[in-house]
């Protein structure tokens, strides 16, 4: 089985004190990434939710802005439907995995 080495990075799940290693196949060094998206979940090398929370927060924020801008044009029932289509799926997807919350400091805007 042939692999496209350019499109096949690797990610180490590690402790913050571990050393960085290099992996090569047939003399070709494979690119290491610190974060990757797998099944819609952004996973970093330390298995924290920070990257995932940032991405999901941005998506939800954009969708809230859309609903807010058109809020005066539609009845509440339509806006509620938009919430369940544009925002709620991000809150529900993999929520069972969020059982171990982390403390995230959100900078003031």
Image (spheres, rainbow, N blue to C red):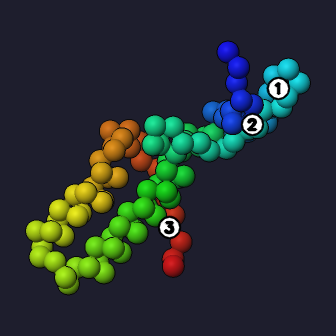
The first of marks 1 and 2 along the sequence is 2
User: Which element type, helix, strand or loop, lies under badge 1?
Assistant: strand
Q: Is residue 22 left or right of residue 49?
A: right
In the displayed structure, would residue 11 be above or below residue 78? above
> Are the residues at dot 1 and dot 3 in contact (C-beta closer than 8 Å)?
no
Give the residue drawn at x 71%, y 20%.
2
User: What is the distance, in whole Å, between disc 1 and disc 2 at their CAs?
Assistant: 12 Å
User: Which element type, helix, strand or loop, lies under badge 3?
Assistant: loop
Residue closest to the far bottom? 72
> Are the residues at dot 2 and dot 3 in contact (C-beta closer than 8 Å)?
no
Which quarter shows the N terminus? top right
Give the residue drawn at x 53%, y 72%.
107
Residue 47 image offset from top left, x and y in percent: 55, 39
- Residue marked by disc 3: 106
Task: State which mark lies toward you, 1 or 3.
Answer: 1
Q: Is 81 or 101 nearer to us in this picture?
A: 81
Q: Is residue 90 left or right of residue 41?
A: left
Task: State which mark lies toward you, 1 or 2.
Answer: 2
Q: Total label count?
A: 3
Residue 99 visible in image? no
- Residue marked by disc 2: 6
Residue closest to the far top? 1
> Are the residues at dot 1 and dot 2 in contact (C-beta closer than 8 Å)?
no
Task: State which mark lies toward you, 2 or 3.
Answer: 2
User: Which element type, helix, strand or loop, lies under badge 2?
Assistant: helix
The first of marks 2 and 3 along the sequence is 2
The first of marks 1 and 3 along the sequence is 1
Task: Say the numbered circle drawn on residue 24.
Answer: 1
Task: Say the numbered circle drawn on residue 51.
Answer: none
Q: Residues within 10 Å of mark 3 (few under 14, many from 20)?
A: few
């Amino acid at each position: 089985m042939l692999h496209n080495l350019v499109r096949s990075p690797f990610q180490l799940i590690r402790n913050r004190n571990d050393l960085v290693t290099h992996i090569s196949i047939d003399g070709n060094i494979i690119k290491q990434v610190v974060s990757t998206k797998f099944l819609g979940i952004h996973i970093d090398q330390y298995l924290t939710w920070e990257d995932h929370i940032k991405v999901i927060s941005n998506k939800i924020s954009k969708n809230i802005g859309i609903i807010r801008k058109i809020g005066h044009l539609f009845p509440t029932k339509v806006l509620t439907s938009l919430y369940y289509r544009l925002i709620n799926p991000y809150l529900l997807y993999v929520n069972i995995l969020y059982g171990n919350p982390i403390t995230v400091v959100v900078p003031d805007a």
